[in-house]
Each structure stands twice: as structure tokens, then as C-alpha cells.
Image (cartoon, rainbow, N blue to C red):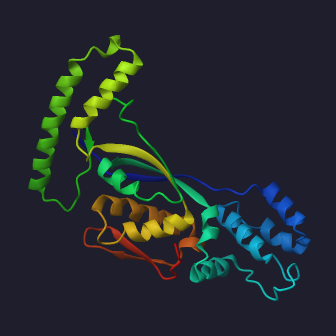
Amino acid sequence: MKRVRPIVIKIGETRVNREGMMQMLQALGVSEPGQARFKSMADTGETVMELAGRMCYQSFEIGLNPNVTKIREDSKEYFANLAKKGDGSVMEHGVLSWAFLYCSRVMTHELVRHRAGVAISQESLRYVRLRDVKLWLPDELTEDQKAQMEHAVEQTEEAYRRLDASIPWDTLPMDAKKRLTSAMRRILPDGLATHVVWSANHRALRWIIEMRTDPAAEVEIRHVFDQVAQICVRDHPMIYGDFVRTELPDGTGCWKPTLRSKV
């Protein structure tokens, strides 16, 4: 048995198609000065979201919509107003993709409860036959408790290894390997480390960060989403800049927004 810790890596995000953005602005009749503001913006999901939100009210510039007599030209103010009003649907246009590595099936069972606005691809233990058992043990356990849990897992791993050694894997077709691999995983603990790629739009992420870093949340998912929140605040301050972190006794952070958007 090997001890591991969950690793959080942002692996992708929504990007702007700059040529398409300019085609859209021109087709909507936005003037060259109005287009210039968007030309200077970053090729990020925030720009896609702002384009979508401004399209709803034709608020790209004064004069495009006769009903609009003033606009928020600063993007930071624009997104703060969206969050304050609860216009969360605009935030669904931007998506972040994450690799959560060496997290347990305990954590992923909690994660899949969040379905709206997310996509999940998890390591398949029907196909993947394990070389070793990896496990993360919460820091809040005493050393004696950790030792007892390790012992229990090592006994299970020994039984798994004996079963694995009794099977002539090299002589079996893939379908038979898959069936046996699937059957054998049933004796392994829920705490077994696994990998998952998880994508979520910004509206869902704001909500999940708040819920899963709450002190009442399960310790491992709190550990994971504390890391997610730190990356979101660092990389996307216009969307997450209103989140405030309070450190908890176990070293994880509880994140709460000061501008609460509706879900």
C-alpha cells in the first residue's frame, strides 16, 4: 500500500474564437470603437460570457439599443453586477476542466452528486488492473488510527494479490480480463485512490466551491475544492474575486462569496 495525496490540476478552459467574435460584433452593428474594447480583451471564458450577456440587452455600446443610455464599460464591474443581480445563466458559457488525481472513490461518490453543468470521466476499474493500492488518509486521524487503517488495507491488498497471481492473465482475451478485473475490484476499499477528469461551468463552480468547502463537508472533497477555489481566484478574479477564505483547524479553507448569485 502507498500513501498519496489528492492532486488538483486545471487542464483546460473555454477560449474565445477571436475571428468569430469579430464577425458577431460586426453582424450586430457594433461600431469600430465599440469593437476595439473587445479586441483588447483576453481570449478567455470571461470574454465569451461578457459577449453573451451584452448580446441579451445589446449593451455593447451606447446607441445600439435605444433603451440603453449607460453601460458598465469595466468588465470587473460588469461581472460584479451579474453576481449581485443573480444573472447566473451567463456564467454557464465559461467552462473549466480539472484533473483530480489520487482522490478516493469516497470523494468521487460525493462529486457525482453535482450533475447540473458538469461533465465527468473517471478511471475505469473494469479495464484498469491495479499494480498497487494507493490511499489517502485524512490528516485529522491520529498516527495510531492511521496505522490501524493501513493494516486493514494491507490485509485486503494481500488477498487481492493472491487472487491476481492465481489468474493466467496472459492467456485471456480482453473481455475475460475485463470481467475478472471488474469482479476483483469489489474487495478493494472505497478509499482506493483513483483519477477523474471533471469539467464545470462557472455558475456551477461558484456553488460547488461554496458547498464543498463548508466546514460540514467531507474532509477530502473539502481539501480538493479548497485547491480548486485558490486556482479560480488566482486565474479568474473577475468571477471569483468576491470569495473570501477562512482557514479551518485542519488547514483547509472555507470559501464564501460576498456577492451571492442565484443557482
Residue 225 vertical position relative to residue 247 in the rendered view, above or below: above
User: Which quarter of the picture shows residue 87?
Assistant: bottom right
Q: Residue at x 85, y 83 (%)?
A: 62
Q: Quadrant of the N terminus?
A: top left
Residue 261 vertical position relative to residue 154 in the rendered view, above or below: below
Q: Residue at x 59, y 72 (%)?
A: 88
Q: Which residue is at the far top?
A: 171
- Count of labels shown? 0
Q: Residue at x 41, y 39 (%)?
A: 123
User: Which quarter of the picture shows residue 125?
Assistant: top left
Q: Residue at x 29, y 52 (%)?
A: 106
Is residue 139 something that shows in the picture? yes
Q: Position of residue 239 (x, y in %)?
A: 57, 72
Q: Position of residue 83 (x, y in %)?
A: 58, 78
62 to the left or right of 5: right
160 to the left or right of 77: left
Q: Position of residue 52 (x, y in %)?
A: 72, 67
95 to the left or right of 163: right
User: Which quarter of the picture shows residue 32?
Assistant: bottom right
Q: Position of residue 92 (x, y in %)?
A: 60, 64
Residue 175 vertical position relative to residue 56 in the rendered view, above or below: above
Q: Looking at the picture, tell me which residue is in the foreground, 160 or 183.
A: 183
28 to the left or right of 170: right
Is residue 131 something that shows in the picture? no
